[in-house]
């Protein structure tokens, strides 16, 4: 299962830019991998883990802007087509190293 986060945050003032950087850094600290600018994804064990992660994102989300999430199964994520560009070979972008206890 994947949790994707898409956001559009204002960056007009220095405080808004600081909030943007802080939000992006927190996403990376939570294990998200940048798919495109403002689109991040992370492998999750199941839907409950993804919902828990959504709640954690809500705690550090800035007050202004738009942040959207959606959950995808691995099959849906792997059906993604690249019209231009190449997929990232980052190990964090695969579920092969995941151990379910």
Image (cartoon, helix red, strand yellow):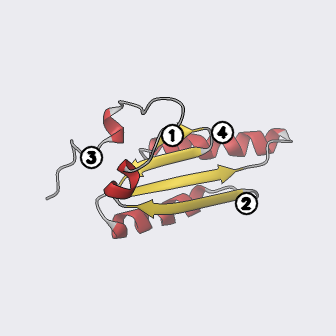
The number of numbered discs placed on residues in the rendered structure image is 4
**Vertical placement of 43 versus 47: above or below?**
above
Q: Pick the residue in front: 4 or 29.
A: 4
Measure how far apart labels 2 and 1 are at the Cα level. Answer: 24 Å
Measure how far apart labels 2 and 4 are at the Cα level. Answer: 14 Å
Q: What number is the disc on residue 35?
A: 1
Task: Say whether disc 3 or disc 4 marks the residue closer to the N-terminus.
Answer: 4
Q: Does residue 53 appear anywhere in the picture?
A: no
Q: Residue at x 64, y 58 (%)?
A: 67
The residue at which mark 4 appears reads as: 21
Task: Say whether disc 2 or disc 1 marks the residue closer to the N-terminus.
Answer: 1
Please rate how many residues cluster around mark 3, counting C-alpha atoms within 10 Å: few if below 14, some from 14 to 19, many from 20.
some
For the N terminus, the quadrant is bottom left
Does residue 57 appear left or right of residue 63 in this picture?
left
The residue at which mark 3 appears reads as: 95
Is disc 4 placed on a helix, strand or loop?
helix
């Amino acid at each position: 299962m994947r949790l994707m986060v898409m956001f559009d945050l204002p960056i007009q003032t220095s405080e808004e830019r600081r909030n943007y950087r802080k939000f992006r850094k927190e996403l990376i600290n939570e294990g998200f991998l940048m798919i495109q600018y403002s689109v991040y994804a992370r492998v999750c064990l199941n839907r409950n883990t993804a919902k828990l992660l959504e709640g954690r994102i809500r705690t550090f989300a800035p007050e202004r802007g738009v942040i959207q999430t959606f959950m995808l199964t691995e099959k849906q994520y792997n059906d993604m087509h690249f019209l231009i560009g190449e997929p990232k070979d980052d190990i964090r972008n695969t579920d092969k190293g995941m151990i379910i206890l």
